[in-house]
Image (tube, helix red, strand yellow):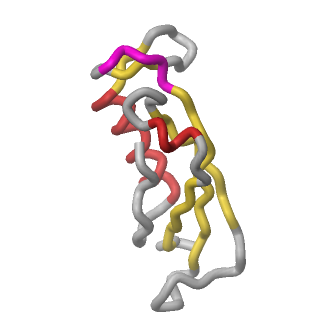
């Protein structure tokens, strides 16, 4: 999964996009949160997504420097570039 693009939304909406990706492109292989790719049947891995938290009072991407993290799932066979990538995005908090 590519990092979701930054836009005005809450962290919960961000996490919801990740859960939707799992629902759309993966199938569970256990009851403890493990998945496999529906396309190639490879086990899904997780990397860390670093999210800069931006202040809505500024028009552009600006904030205090706060960074949150979320687990970002990916298929190592269909998306091998994600294994080595440092993934970043931003969220523009709507309710601080």
Q: Residue at x 60, y 44 (%)?
A: 84
**Quarter of the image with the N terminus in it:** top left
Q: Main secondary structure of the magenta part?
A: loop
**Is 56 in front, or is 66?**
66
- Residue 83, compared with residue 15, is above or below; it is above
**Is 5 in front, or is 19?**
5
- Residue 64, compared with residue 75, is above or below; it is below
Is 44 left or right of 85, judged from the image as shown? left
Q: Quadrant of residue 20?
A: top left
Q: Residue 33: x and y, percent?
A: 53, 20
- Residue 94, compared with residue 58, is above or below; it is above
Q: Residue 40: x and y, percent?
A: 33, 19
Q: Residue at x 52, y 57 (%)?
A: 11
Q: Residue at x 47, y 36 (%)?
A: 80
The magenta region covers: 40-44
**Quarter of the image with the C terminus in it:** bottom right
Q: Is residue 83 magenta?
A: no
Please identify the residue farthest to the top as the structure is shown.
30
Q: Quadrant of residue 32?
A: top right
- Residue 89, compared with residue 36, is above or below; it is below
């Amino acid at each position: 999964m590519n990092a979701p693009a930054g836009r005005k939304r809450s962290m919960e909406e961000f996490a919801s996009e990740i859960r939707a990706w799992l629902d759309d492109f993966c199938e569970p292989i256990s009851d403890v949160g493990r998945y496999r790719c529906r396309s190639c049947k490879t086990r899904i891995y997780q990397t860390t997504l670093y999210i800069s938290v931006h202040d809505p009072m500024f028009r552009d991407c600006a904030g205090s420097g706060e960074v949150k993290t979320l687990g970002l799932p990916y298929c190592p066979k269909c998306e091998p570039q994600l294994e080595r990538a440092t993934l970043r995005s931003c969220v523009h908090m709507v309710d601080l």
